[in-house]
Image: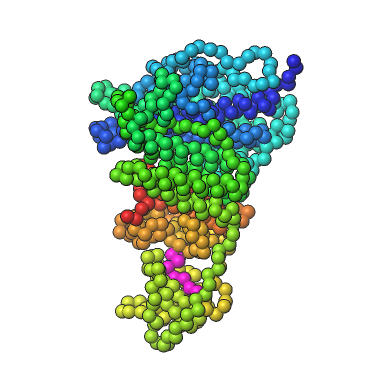
Amino acid sequence: MEIARPTREELIHRLYEAAELEHNLMCTYLYAAFSLKDADDGLLAEEAAATARWRRTILEVAIEEMGHLCAVWNITCALGGAPRFGRGNFPLDPGYLPAGVVVKLAPFNEAVLQHFIYLERPKDSAEPDGTGFEPPVKYRRGSAAPRLTPMGIDYDTVGDFYASLGENITRFVERIGEKAAFCGDPALQLSPDEIDLSGAKPVICSKTALAAFDAIVLQGEGAPAESEGSHYQKFSAIRSEYRALKEANRTFQPAFPAAVNPVLRRPPRPEGRVWIENEEAAQCVDLANATYGLMLRLIAYAYGVPRPAPAKAAAVDLGIGLMQAVTLLAERAARLPAGPSNPECHAGVTFVTLRDAAGFPAGVAAHRFFIERLTELARGAATLDSTDIRTTRAARLLNDLAGRCHREFDDAASLTRGPTATAATAASTAAAASVPPAPQSVAGVEEIEGKDLTLLFDSKKCIHSRFCVTWAPNVFLANVQGPWIHPDAMNVERLVEIAHVCPSGAIRYRRKDGKTEEAAPLVNLIATRENGPYAVRADMQLDGQRGVFRATLCRCGASKNKPFCDGSHNEVKFAASGEPPSGKTDMLAARDGTLAIDPETDGPLRVRGNLEITSGTGRVVTRSTQARLCRCGGSGNKPFCDGTHAKIGFRSSNT
């Protein structure tokens, strides 16, 4: 039978295997990282510092694997296919991958580390596999004869696999042409507008597809031994440090004895599996698995929504948040006993995937599913051990994500509709020209009635910029006892202008004369104040609240009124330049519109929408449609987040 090869079906089939392989490797790396001990788990100071570094390194590798996954999914989309998000559950049956590629969930130890080095080894490397990772049987996959049905191929290293895949794409393009080959809608792919991963680069031709493969190999599997920063080098460095610490202390055990290939139900074939019988551990693992499963659903959904729909970025943001919850729950599971049948080991997250992990069709039905499911996860988290810091943080995070999901998906137009107009207050309290009227407190905000407007003052948001008392000293009476705001002491139009320059939004107003209320800015701006907060002037959706146009948001990490600044940066002597260097400043297609700002639980400010970040003096630092801004005060890349919040244990709670 004459078959023009490679076919599109064959390419997509191989990309599915690439996605499953990257996905499986990512899970095994995460599992090992989750099993590592902390400083309070009986380690010496030097050992605890080392395990903390190893955890960070392994998690960085896992994130890079996620970037590889993203690249593979983008190439699949470019060829007209739908990315695959499922995979075989652990442990994988023989034949699923080549005999020499063994993947299973196992806690960090020297054999597991050696296995990681073996998987990431350069071509022609003599590195052996870790003990216990020998293939159960020797076999060959595929067939040399041409077939219409694609079959798996054998390869010695993952780098060889990607080299073969790149050659096939080149041949396919030579046969049918670039335009016909890459016929998928590029708007379905993930890009830097939705996610900050190296692999999230649009693929539109063979050149961009092959560049993605080269980046995967150079960074990870199959990179040359001398490739700086490759996964092989990173794991090799951990091995050297581990051996030195082990030699200094023969009793050094850097990780908990988490189960090898744990399962949540009694296995029909118990060999090589650990059944988690301890109910507390089982509940924790069950919630971690369900959270992980919803994360896959959301990322899959994002690939079915064309850019620039707000739901695309919202799905990715929620997925990232869910993975943070999985981390907390998985670390807790590794610290709990597996059960009486396996008293020698602990539990561990099993990363179960359902039979169908594909994305739902775009629309209201999918949004309803996400809202319902995240609400269920939040309720489940509330039943876990409330005395453990990891489960309590996971419960708080899932509860926050459930609220955010409801805001994002309850109405498909939630990020595009305009703010609801605020009704003018009908109250009219006459005030003597020389005596300021007494304020009324409404939900903690002072309301001062004037003839033409009601002035609102929120003392919790005030950062004492002093525009009010210096520009309108007859209205805002400094250093007086009792009522101090006199709205009728100045022309109403001039008073409205002064309210607009209040950067924190502590001063607002409601007009009574029927004239226009405060309007959304024409350009969304976030300014970095020297040693101080972010000054935001935009059509904000701040943590779900609409109609907010001005705010100063904490970036020192010390505010007791997060996400707002309360002046604590002065108390803690926070130091951060208000003049960061300029980066990408290309003009955006639009400069206004809704700017969604979501404070991530114990993490940065997630910002989406047309945005210009400026220095304190107004110079453009960057123009972008998405950013993650540091609010722990510790980032080495201010104003942007670099992950330091996780290292220093930043907490966004004000309690």
As drawn, is 388 to the left or to the right of 318?
left
Q: Residue visible at 43% across and 65% down?
A: 504
As drawn, is 631 to the left or to the right of 526?
left
Q: Residue visible at 59% across and 55% down?
A: 413
> At which x and y percent is residue 181?
70, 32
As drawn, is 629 to the left or to the right of 40?
right
Residue 504 covered by magenta stretch: yes
> At which x and y percent is residue 239?
36, 24
Residue 354 makes an appearance in the image: yes
Comparing 519 with 413, the one in front is 413
Q: Quadrant of residue 517?
A: bottom right
Comparing 144 with 461, the one in front is 144
Q: Residue visible at 72% across and 26% down?
A: 174
Q: Which residues are magenta?
A: 503-510
Q: Residue visible at 61% across and 16% down?
A: 142
Residue 618 makes an appearance in the image: no
Return the residue found at the far top: 138
Colour setting? rainbow
Q: Quadrant for the C terminus, please.
A: bottom left
> At which x and y percent is residue 270?
41, 21
Residue 643 covered by magenta stretch: no
Count of marks placed on residues: 0
> At which x and y percent is residue 508?
46, 71
Location of residue 530 with respect to 21 vertically, above or below: below
Comparing 83 with 343, the one in front is 343
Q: Quadrant of residue 438?
A: bottom left
Q: Quadrant for the N terminus, please.
A: top right
Comparing 366 with 583, the one in front is 366
